[in-house]
Image (cartoon, rainbow, N blue to C red):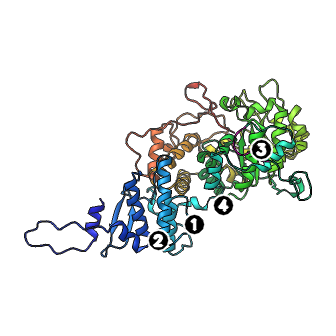
Amino acid sequence: AAAAAAAAAAPKEEVEEGDEEARPVQLPTAQELLQRGDAPVRQEFLRRECFAKGVKRVRRAAEVDAQGHALTLANHKGAPSLGFRSRGKRARREVQKLQRALQQASGAAPAEPDCLEQREQEEQQQHQEPESTGPTAPAPSKALDLQQIPRGYHLELNGLQREAQHALRKHKYNFTAADGVLKSMGIQVKYRAGKSHEPVPRDGDDSTELPLREQEKAKVDLAGKTILAPLTTVGNLPFRRLCKKLGAEVTVGEMALATNLLMGKSSEWALLRRHPCEDIFGVQVCGGFADSLTRCGQLISDHVKCDFVDINCGCPIDMICEKGGGSALLDKPNRLQQIIQGMTRVLPCPLTVKVRIGKDDKHPSVHEYILPRLKEWGASAITIHGRTRQQRYTKLANWDYIYKCASESPIPVIGNGDIFSYSDYAAHMAEEHGLAGVMVGRGALIKPWIFTEIKEKRLWDISGSERLDQLKDFAHFGLEHWGSDERGVENTRRFLLEFLSYSHRYVPVGLLEVLPPDLRWRPPPYFGRTDIETRLASEEPEEWIALTEMFLGKAPPGYSFQPKHKSNSYSKGGGTRDWESGI
């Protein structure tokens, strides 16, 4: 492909009589490329050297202009540059070594980006005029032009620096602040995730550095605001951007495991990403021990920009509870006390707690052991999901118990469970109940415009074309977040399908005989008012895949989809399925 492109673009050479074909154009050598020094030439030099080193790379086509100087790289499919797909530590070391050698040889030593893709984008932006607005969104019936999708990854916040990630993976991160707090509390650090340092004393004093007082910490007011609950898998950044566009005021990232954050896993740190449009943003962490969570609190303080941190004490998944996290903390108030006190002393922002009402239906226990002591421990607010660990998502949320806790709590209480319309929101936010706010979870997955309904105090009879526009927005946000290359398109398709596995449960308000709608209703198959509504209501994954092809192009041959989360409050055939979420 490179030879064909070069031959087509290069000037034609004189051909001697009797020769049937022209001689192939000779591409410049690596040394000649290096001497020219312009950005595309350096990319070509690095590409050739990495091919020689055996580093795997996406197929590329080299295009040469008439003079043979300007070389550009592009995918065969026309998507933006992917950079290297290095496999293993050896390949990554070779790439880094070549990048350093190339910078030294060219005489310029700019700040080294994390990957070749970012460097190519920065060099392209230097030669392009800044645009006042982004690309115009195409019509819903047409696929998105992948070449016009900007990569919004560089706009996102809370990325872990390479040096910090390397220190975490090598167990060399400096946890001085967290270890000092743990030592003052008499807790021995058992989790091996960094160096054990002695607390740094003040000048002229043998005491350790004092933590921030409550008056010195940043404040956040959640009272009366619409809050999007942390949703595992489906509560990703593109979905949160969609909810922000539809009226959500507070967003919370997906549940992140403290142990994975301490190991520097990129997939776990990606859960803490924040878009600039999320003006009030919180991160949720899950763990079962004070040493790991206190150190995680220092990491968040050092590298994450958020308005509050939430501790997950409500996840009912057995895998999480067996490790001491999630709902298992409800039976261990002393351990929860150590976690809250340790994290509060290392965090510069408020700390909140999200719990369920208890372990089983017969013994709700939050009001007895945890709720009266939270303010003393240092928590700023508590969110109560009106179900027990045993219930998971069956039956109704116990809002009477939430009201009881709100009347006895010394800190603000936020209710959560079965919010599906403005009527539900208004009923729970009545003044006599004493709630500071309401958090929306599954209702936002089925109808993310519920925040618009709450804001405008009405039921929105949304049309099929408007819902299709929302899917287009999700696809656009996904391509900005995950990239518009082949891998990014498939990630966007997968999470869009996860979203469709919930949104198909929505029944248009204009077709209902009884209002307001209820989250527990199981609608039979029906024909919508338009063909779009009928397709959006389909329960078949094949139909969902066809909907994604309207925005992301044709799916790969033999592509299939199985939803990761399955709700036990809505199932075919009357059976029960567990919706394993980290809410």
Picture coordinates of residue 460, whole percent (x, y): 64, 51
Mark 4 or mark 2: whose residue is earlier in sequence: 2
Q: Which residues are magenta?
A: 191-197
Left or right: 70 in relation to 130:
left
Task: Specify whether 73 is left or right of 464.
Answer: left
The tag earlier along the polypeptide, 3 or 2, is 2
Left or right: where 327 falls relative to 473: right
Q: Eyeballing the image, is 577 above or below 161?
A: above
Which mark is nearer the camera, 4 or 1?
Answer: 1
Say which of 543 and 63 sits in front. Answer: 63
Give the number of the disc on residue 106: 2
**Label 4 environment density (alpha carbons within 10 Å; few <14, some 14–19, many ≥20):** few
Q: Would you identify the image quadrant in which residue 147 lies? A: bottom left
| Type of amino acid under label 3 | Thr
Q: What predominant SS class does the magenta segment belong to?
A: loop
The answer to whether the residue labelled 4 contacts the one labelled 2, judged by CB atoms less than 8 Å apart, is no
Disc nearer the start of the sequence (1/2) = 2
Mark-to-mark CA distance, 3 and 2: 46 Å
Q: Residues within 10 Å of mark 3 (few under 14, many from 20)?
A: many
- Identify residue type, mark 1: Ala
Q: Secondary structure at mark 2?
A: helix
Quadrant assignment for the C terminus: top right
Q: Label 4 amino acid? A: Pro
Residue where numbered disc 1 is placed: 111
**Can you tell which of label 1 and label 3 is closer to the viewer?**
1
Total marks in image: 4
Q: Tell me the residue that label 3 is attached to.
A: 294
